[in-house]
Amino acid sequence: MKRRIRGENKNIEYKREIPARHEKLLKDIIAFANTSGGQVVIGVEYNGISVSASERKRKELELEGQRISYDTMMEIGRDFEVKSAEQLCKNMYQEAVKNCKTEEQRAAVKNMTIQKLENIGILRREGKELCPTHAYSLLTDNPNRNAIIQCARFKGEDRRIFLDKREMDGPIYR
């Protein structure tokens, strides 16, 4: 759905999307900061017509604004199982040792514990109960077939040329 929004002025700048090259956007923000202030509104064309963001993108931005990442959110419908968490700790330790190149590095690898999983946000506490997060699912059996991790490697700094792109649907270390 598109709707008209009042036009740009000295205190408001519209951007259809965040540009691939951020210099212009940063200059606008700095200019507002150095003068009487203003707003840069993403998702609106220059002529004031709003551009609908996907539901997923809106949710992403909402979480980002609250400083919450998808990975650390509780996995709804999944109960915490000690045996499964202990297996994840064992797998993480084995994977860390396997990726070491020297005996010194292997000797420095510490055991993963359930407490460490909580400390780094793979498990989270709701009241007194431990709960698995989305990250936990991606590191174990991943029952959510829609959850994937996308990784890419680019040539240069402008993210235009892909050197490598992969999708992983968990457990991601396999």
Image (cartoon, grey):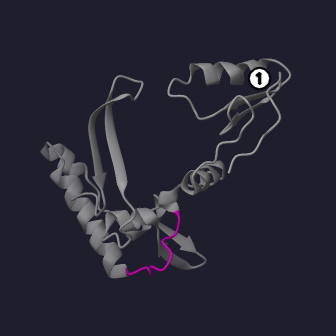
Q: Residue at x 19, y 54 (%)?
A: 97
Secondary structure, mark 1, is: helix
- Looking at the image, residue 161 sits to the left or right of residue 123; the answer is left
Q: Quadrant of residue 89?
A: bottom left
- The part of the chain drawn in magenta is 73-81
Magenta stretch secondary structure, dominant? loop
Observer-nearest residue: 75 or 92?
75
Residue 120 pos. (x, y %): 45, 58
Residue 66 magenta-highlighted: no
Q: Residue at x 75, y 45 (%)?
A: 3
Residue 44 pos. (x, y %): 69, 37
Residue 75 magenta-highlighted: yes
Q: Which residue is mark 1?
A: 33
Q: Residue at x 49, y 75 (%)?
A: 131
- Looking at the image, residue 15 sits to the left or right of residue 36; the answer is left
Taking 158 as reference, is 91 above or below it?
below
Observer-nearest residue: 162 or 129?
162
- Looking at the image, residue 155 sits to the left or right of residue 64; the answer is left
Residue 138 pos. (x, y %): 36, 63
- Looking at the image, residue 11 sits to the left or right of residue 127; the answer is right
